[in-house]
Image (spheres, rainbow, N blue to C red):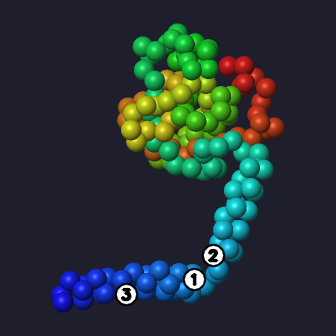
């Protein structure tokens, strides 16, 4: 008798979940499921039409480090040699030639750099700056710091920066 009671109770609860749970979920969200799905698809479609490169929204805080001088002259992921005196950086997925304004929030010092490499590959780090860029914002002693990163739109960049 106990086994039959347990099976009956399990069947009853299963039907409750099957029929009552969607009604409760819809009343909690106060919006029908079709409305939510439509809003999400509109968001995806809208994001396909934006002109900004993916990865770093304006003013995003990232953890930055810098290349040591020993990498000077080695080939970067973009094919150009790393120049520790250049104002360049590495990012995991921003397109090459993207121009970024990197600001040290503690000192207020900023530098404009160009993405020409991939990395960093250490967990918890988002940006590798060239030695010169790190020196310009005063992060050489610390080595790893949080920075504010803003993507500079292509139209507003100076032509000389892209050739560095």
Q: Earlier in the sequence, mark 3 or mark 1?
A: 3
Numbered tag placed on residue 33 in the rendering: 2
Residue at the spot of label 3: 12
- Whether residue 16 is visible, yes or no, is yes
Q: Is residue 53 left or right of residue 56?
A: right
| Disc 3 to disc 1: CB gap under 8 Å | no
Q: CA distance from mark 1 to mark 2?
A: 7 Å
Residue at the spot of label 1: 26
Q: Dot 1 surroundings within 10 Å: few (below 14), some, or many (20 or more)? A: few
Q: Give whichever of 125, 134 is nearer the camera.
A: 125
Q: Residue at x 74, y 56 (%)?
A: 45
Q: Quadrant of residue 100?
A: top right
Label 3 vs label 1, nearer the camera: 3
Q: In x, y percent, where is residue 140?
A: 42, 30
| Disc 1 to disc 2: CB gap under 8 Å | yes
Q: Secondary structure at mark 2?
A: helix
Q: Residue at x 72, y 19 (%)?
A: 163
**Residue at the right extreme?**
155
Q: Is residue 123 left or right of residue 52?
A: left
Q: Quadrant of residue 79?
A: top right
Q: Residue at x 58, y 36 (%)?
A: 93
Q: Secondary structure at mark 3?
A: helix
- Whether residue 136 is visible, yes or no, is no
Q: In x, y percent, where is residue 132?
A: 53, 24
Q: Earlier in the sequence, mark 3 or mark 2?
A: 3
Q: CA distance from mark 3 to mark 2?
A: 26 Å
Q: In x, y percent, where is residue 86?
A: 59, 20
Label 3 vs label 2, nearer the camera: 3
Q: CA distance from mark 3 to mark 1?
A: 21 Å
């Amino acid at each position: 008798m106990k086994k039959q009671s347990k099976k009956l109770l399990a069947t009853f609860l299963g039907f409750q979940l099957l029929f009552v749970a969607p009604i409760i979920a819809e009343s909690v969200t106060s919006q029908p499921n079709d409305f939510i799905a439509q809003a999400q698809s509109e968001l995806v479609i809208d994001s396909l039409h934006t002109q900004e490169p993916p990865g770093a929204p304006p003013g995003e805080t990232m953890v930055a480090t810098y290349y040591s001088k020993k990498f000077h002259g080695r080939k970067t992921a973009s094919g150009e040699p790393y120049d520790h005196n250049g104002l360049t950086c590495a990012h995991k997925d921003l397109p090459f030639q993207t121009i970024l304004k990197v600001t040290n929030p503690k000192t207020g010092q900023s530098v404009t750099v160009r993405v020409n490499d991939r990395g960093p590959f250490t967990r918890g780090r988002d940006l590798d700056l060239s030695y010169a860029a790190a020196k310009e914002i005063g992060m050489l002693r610390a080595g790893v710091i949080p920075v504010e990163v803003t993507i500079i739109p292509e139209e507003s960049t100076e032509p000389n920066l892209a050739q560095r």
